[in-house]
């Protein structure tokens, strides 16, 4: 099949614009949704979200939790905090509930520490449980474990990063030891990346001058010996 010269030009232009549109579409990065209250099932299906401070959160998987258990987010200062409230209070004694998630620090910051917390809205005099957060990529001083011991709410230990990381993946393991537990909390904090200190320009120059003087002294000594 043959085409007129004008038709050939139109075909070439159509191919060019089609390729350009593919390039621009593929080159556009999808922006993560804002972190908002959502069930475990909805949050996992949605993928990653970004909170008001710029932290990125992604729920990778969960085990033994009810898909209708509900996440909420609250951030302040340099800390990203999530809370998980049971659709009904957790009371499956002996079962391990597991959350697997990833947190990335805001631009210009690195992760500093993480911690955990447990609470009960039923009968704190009878309820007991543990929630331990461990890091996949950073041994730190963790895991950051919280133990709910009647009759008070428990605040967990703190695991500090050394060195600091930009992103990390966590495993939160929760267990009801007795009675019922109503909610659990995880906190990940960040700190600004310190500016790198440039080496003063005169130092390399002084080193070169000193090297030149030493080499000249050595040459003069050799000449005097000869």
Image (spheres, grey):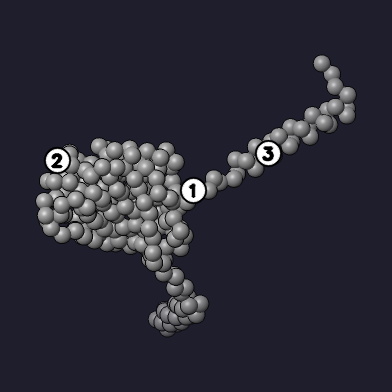
Tell me where residue 190 appears, x and y as whole percent. Answer: 37, 62
* Mark 3 nearby-residue class (10 Å; few <14, some 14–19, many ≥20): few
Q: Evaluate whether residue 182 shows in this view.
A: yes
Q: CA distance from mark 2 to mark 3?
A: 56 Å
Tell me where residue 67 appears, x and y as whole percent. Answer: 33, 37
Residue corresponding to mark 1: 33
SS at mark 3?
helix
Q: Nearer the viewer, residue 112 or 67?
A: 67
* Mark 2 nearby-residue class (10 Å; few <14, some 14–19, many ≥20): some
Q: Evaluate whether residue 98 shows in this view.
A: no
Residue 42 falls in which quadrant of the image? top left
Q: Nearer the viewer, residue 186 or 26?
A: 186
Q: Nearer the viewer, mark 2 or mark 1?
A: 2
Which residue reaches farthest top? 1
SS at mark 1?
strand
Label located before the other in sequence (2 or 3): 3
Residue corresponding to mark 2: 93
Q: Residue at x 73, y 37 (%)?
A: 17
With 164 as the anchor, is 208 left or right in this view? right
Tell me where residue 108 appears, x and y as whole percent. Answer: 46, 63
């Amino acid at each position: 099949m043959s085409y007129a010269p004008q038709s050939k030009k139109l075909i070439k232009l159509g191919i060019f614009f089609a390729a350009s549109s593919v390039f621009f579409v593929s080159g556009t990065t999808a922006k993560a949704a804002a972190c908002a209250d959502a069930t475990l099932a909805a949050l996992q299906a949605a993928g990653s979200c970004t909170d008001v401070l710029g932290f990125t959160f992604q729920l990778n998987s969960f085990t033994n939790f009810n898909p209708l258990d509900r996440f909420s987010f609250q951030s302040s200062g340099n800390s990203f905090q999530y809370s998980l409230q049971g659709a009904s209070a957790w009371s499956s004694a002996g079962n391990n509930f597991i959350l697997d998630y990833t947190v990335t620090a805001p631009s210009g910051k690195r992760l500093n520490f993480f911690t955990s917390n447990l609470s009960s809205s039923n009968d704190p005099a009878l309820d007991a449980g543990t929630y331990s957060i461990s890091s996949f990529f950073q041994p730190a001083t963790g895991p950051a474990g919280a133990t709910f011991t009647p009759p008070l709410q428990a605040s967990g230990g703190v695991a500090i990063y050394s060195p600091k990381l930009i992103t990390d993946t966590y495993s939160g393991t929760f267990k009801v030891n007795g009675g019922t537990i109503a909610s659990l909390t995880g906190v990940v904090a960040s700190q600004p990346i310190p500016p790198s200190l440039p080496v003063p320009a005169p130092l390399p120059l002084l080193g070169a001058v000193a090297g030149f003087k030493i080499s000249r002294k050595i040459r003069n000594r050799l000449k005097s010996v000869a």
